[in-house]
Image (spheres, rainbow, N blue to C red):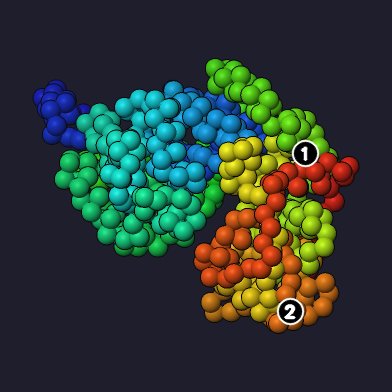
Amino acid sequence: MIRKIPNPRQILLFIFLLFHGGITQPDTLTFIHLNDTHSNLLPSASGRYGGMARAASIISQWKRQEPNPILLHAGDFTVGTLMFNTFFGVPELQILNRLGFDALTLGNHEFDLGSKHLAEILAKAQLDSAFDIICSNARNLSALPLLDSLVRPYAIEQRGQLKIGILGLTTPATNLESNPAPLFLDTNLVQIARQQVQALRARGCQVVVLLSHLGLPADRRLARYLSGVDAIIGGHTHDALDKPMVVNGIPIVQAGEFYHYVGKLRLVWDGTSTRFLDYTLQEIDATIPEEPEVAALLETLQPEVVNRYSASLGNPYQPLALVPRVLANYPAASDTLDTPVGNLFTSAMLVHFPKADAALEPSGYIVEKLYPGALTPAALFRCYPYGFNPTDGLGFRIARYQLTGQEILGVLQALLRQVQPDLQYWDFLPQSCGLQFTAQQGKKGLLLTSVTIGSQPIEPDRAYTLVSSEQVLRYLQRLFGLRPNQVFIDSVSVIQVVNRFVSAQDTLNFRAEGKN
């Protein structure tokens, strides 16, 4: 076979068209992303996983390998560790800034201490102008001028001849579950997304990405109604996806939690459209060396954490007890709804108030498993990090109060209806000690079938003394409209109660008992 060789004139024409726009070379766009890091700056699981210094090593390596990547964080950098309760996320933002992050969308937990405090955190971090804080559905920002000056509805990045638009959406559940007032998060997500896509396209963006803190189920629903979005980079539900979910032609990715993973999404722009190229979900473990500068900075932060919390919790980094195996904080399946960590926490709460009938706390506040090895106060705090009391820097106080059996039944049923086992959504699932219940799957969530307290069927007209966090008590009052009797909020926090309980034991042998 004789191969035809182009003549010199054809070669010169090709070169001319290539460099003068007649032929478009495909452009590879790389997005390096994190989400739900929750100030987990140090490795977890007795050093086996995570750590911001290790993640920084991977990010720096990928930046060297990929031409002009875009670095994104899908929200919830705040709340989760004693590091946050000491430094309020400022060092984390500053390290992200030094690593070259381009945009961060606000998560729901960014508002836990109030919008005014969020503004102060962002201002104190002194971020470069190239690092955009975005939220497309935040409303009434003008009520807080400082925050208004720091938060944008979208970001635009230039890479070569390409403009990449990035819009950000925050879960509207923030309005009920956090403290954004006087701001609120608009619920009209489809309309807002479409408007922002249109605005970004009008500004010349050839590629548009949604940086979402809505959660995977909401991202999948939203994608069905969108056009002009080339990818969704998500957060909120802490899903570690090793490959994208594709809905309506839109790849959706998410990189777990707590610096346990870093994601890398690559798209290709061919001059007229964008297509998916590949995706990498990199686990951050002990085989990855720490980035020296970040590691050195983190080491300087630990003494202040020790100084602040030794009086209330003991040295945060010294062991309390031994964990013999992984203790899960969420159910493995819907046939056993109690969890080892849920049983640990509610047992400790009932020991603190031994004359109470039962302790209750939703799984959504007990947010991390315990790993085998020596358990420290800092690691225990990661299980229950919510709330902030300025007096001691710790979380929700423990509370005792009375409800009738009928009120308890109503609360349990309302919570169970929100549980979605098929989606692994357990946040409203009650964990308990002294109270047992059974439930079955119905058309609209789990249906309560029986309840016993102290091994006896619950009596609707009887008053029962319950123990929970003060936040659960607030929700009973605000969301359920209940008026509990004999309310007492102790001066100690839930985490202090559990910390003392754990300190009195050598080994934590809690298991799922199938009691509910």
Tell me where residue 185 sits by quadrant. Answer: bottom left
**Residue 360 visible within the image:** no
Q: Earlier in the sequence, mark 1 or mark 2?
A: 1
What residue do we see at 63% from left, 24% from top? 304
The answer to which of 329 and 306 lies nearer the viewer is 306
What residue do we see at 30% from left, 49% from top? 140
Q: In this view, does 407 lie above or below 367?
A: below
For the N terminus, the quadrant is: top left
* Mark 1: secondary structure: strand
Q: Is residue 246 above or below residue 86?
A: below
Q: Could you tell me residue 110's position as x and y percent? A: 46, 43
Disc 2 target residue? 462
The amino acid on which the numbered mark 1 sits, given as a three-letter code, is: Leu
What residue do we see at 24% from left, 36% from top? 163
How packed mark 1 is, by other alpha carbons closer than 10 Å (few <14, some 14-19, many 20 or more), is many
Mark toward the viewer: 1 or 2: 2
**Residue 473 visible within the image:** yes
* Mark 2: secondary structure: loop
Left or right of residue 290: residue 190? left
Tell me where residue 162 sits by quadrant. Answer: top left
Left or right of residue 361: residue 149? left
Disc 1 target residue? 375
The answer to which of 307 and 369 lies nearer the viewer is 307
